[in-house]
Every structure is written in structure tokens, then in C-alpha cells.
Amino acid sequence: MDVGVRLKEARLEKGLSLDELQEITKIQKRYLVAIEEGNLSILPGKFYARAFIKEYATAVDLDSSELLEEHKEEIPQTEEESEIQYTRIERSRKEANVDKNSTFSFIPTIIVILLVIGIFFVAWFFIKEGSTDEGNPPEEELTDNEIIINDSTPNSTDNAEQGQEEESNDETDNGADKTSEEETPEEKQSEFTVTEEGTGPVPESTLEFNSSDDELTFTFESPSEVWLDVQNGDGESFYSAILTEADSPMELDLTGEERIYLNIGSAPNLTFDVNGVEFEYPVDPNERDHQRIWINIKQ
């Protein structure tokens, strides 16, 4: 029995129409008809033959892995192109790590600049104090009736008080320098955090994206044809079509959205970033090429 006939029988047993199946799988009705009739050549590409069949099988309660194994001679294989895309993803990850390291390399430079400013401030303070002492008014001349008493104690006391004042000023300046260094805020970094890793034939994972920007921009890129469906938490669709190399890179401005849903038909052939932060699949895309992703936005 052909794979299309088997899928159609399973759909009829569940009492689903093609329109209902299209709503469940997000696959266009004409592609569902092509699968049932065995016309896999009219699908967007051989990547989607596997992805769409797996989605169809899951929707009608069939084991997609077992189904693909039984009909592997009938369904196109995509191992070679998946391996090429996997290499591309690894290279993108390394480039992202280099960018992060270069950002942190500026922190020691900032600390050195603050120390130099503090040294100049202390030097200026002592120069100002010296100028003030030189500008003190001369003592009044004594009259004949006044007695001159030679006592070095007041001068010693003044010198001691001045020394204590200068020492106190030095401690204050040094404390201010240390405080300015310690209170230097670290730049907030945007990053992904996995909260739930999906399982099963079509894993559905959930992540949080902590954003340091008010804007929210998704950038998608593919070297071949990839099925991509982008919605918000209320089901509003922003993109639902095949993304090709000619369309890449494709940007979506999703500023203001709190939750984003992605239905990806061929994960090994799709890379994307959010506000320049590279996305890494929680589930290995070479093992599960069809994936669903929820991203909660935290700003």
C-alpha cells in the first residue's frame, strides 16, 4: 500500500476533512492532496516530502518514524544536504562566540581609563592646595607694646591637622575611585534560555528570549527551500510560506509581541537570529528536522 493511500485511510477513519487537516498541520490543502495521490514531485522540495508526511502522520495518530521507515524507498532522502547545513550552523555558532568575546575585551580598557582619571584628579587637588597656601595674606606687623612669643606648638598642630586633612582627602579620593570602578554597570546581554525541550516525532520546545532592546527583529536565512510558519500567541500569522535562498535573509519586525510560534518544516536548512543573537535548536535538527518552537519575549 502506498504511503499516500495509507495516510488517506487514516484520515477518513478519524473523520477529518482536508480543510480540517490543513488547519491542524498548517500545510496547504493542495500539498495534502498531492501526498494522498502520491504526487510527491509537486511538493516544494524533497525536504518537505518527509516533513509534510511526518506532520500528516502525526495529525492522524500514525507513528511517523515507522511510516517513513516502511516507505523509505518511496520517499526522497535528504541526508547529504542536511550534513552540509549542519556544517553551516556550526560555523555560525563559532562566529557568534567570537563576537561575544570581543565585546567583553573592552571592559579592562574602561577600568584603566577610570584609574587614569582618578590619578589626574588627585594630582589636581594637591596642586590646588599648594596654590592656596602660597596665597595666604602676610601677618600684621607687631607694635612696640606687643610681645613676641616663639612657640612652635601651634605650627606643629597646624601641620599635623593639615597632614590629617590631606590623608583624609587621599582616602576619600581613593574610595571614590574604587566606588566608580565597582559601580560600573555591565552591559545587559540578550540571550536565549531553554525552559522546555520538546520530545516525540515532532518536538515542540519552549524558550525565553531576554532582550536588551525595545525592538524585536527576527532574521531568517536558508540555502534552499524551507517551509516556515510564524505566528504570535493569539494565532495571528506573520509569514506562512516557503522560504528560499532568493528570499534570504528575510527580516520580520515583531516589536511589541510577547510570544512567537515557529513551525519549521526542515530545521537543518534554516538558521535565524533575534536582534542579532543566533538561535540554537534545543533538539538536534539532524535528528528531528520538523520542529515547533515557542519563544516567550522578556524585555
Image: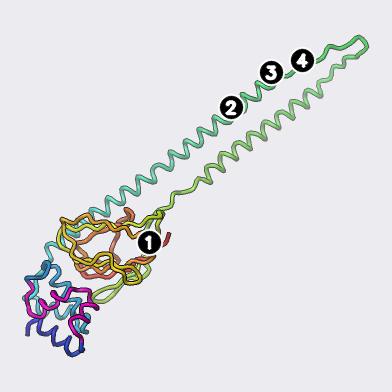
Q: Amino acid at mark 2?
A: Trp
Q: Amino acid at mark 1?
A: Phe
Residue of label 4: 138
Q: Which mark is residue 34?
A: none
Q: Amino acid at mark 4?
A: Pro
Find residue 199 and report its image quarter: bottom left
Quarter of the figure that contains the C terminus: bottom left
Side of 131 where 57 appears, left or right: left
Residue of label 3: 134
Q: Earlier in the sequence, mark 1 or mark 2?
A: 2
Q: Amino acid at mark 3?
A: Glu
Real-space Cα distance between discs 1 and 2? 48 Å
User: Is residue 288 a member of the stretch shown in magenta?
Assistant: no
Q: Which mark is residue 124?
A: 2
Residue of label 1: 209
Identify the element where label 3 is drawn. helix
For disc 2, the neighbor class at 10 Å (few under 14, some 14 to 19, many from 20) is: few
Real-space Cα distance between discs 4 and 3? 10 Å
| Residue in the image at 41% along x and 54% along y | 212
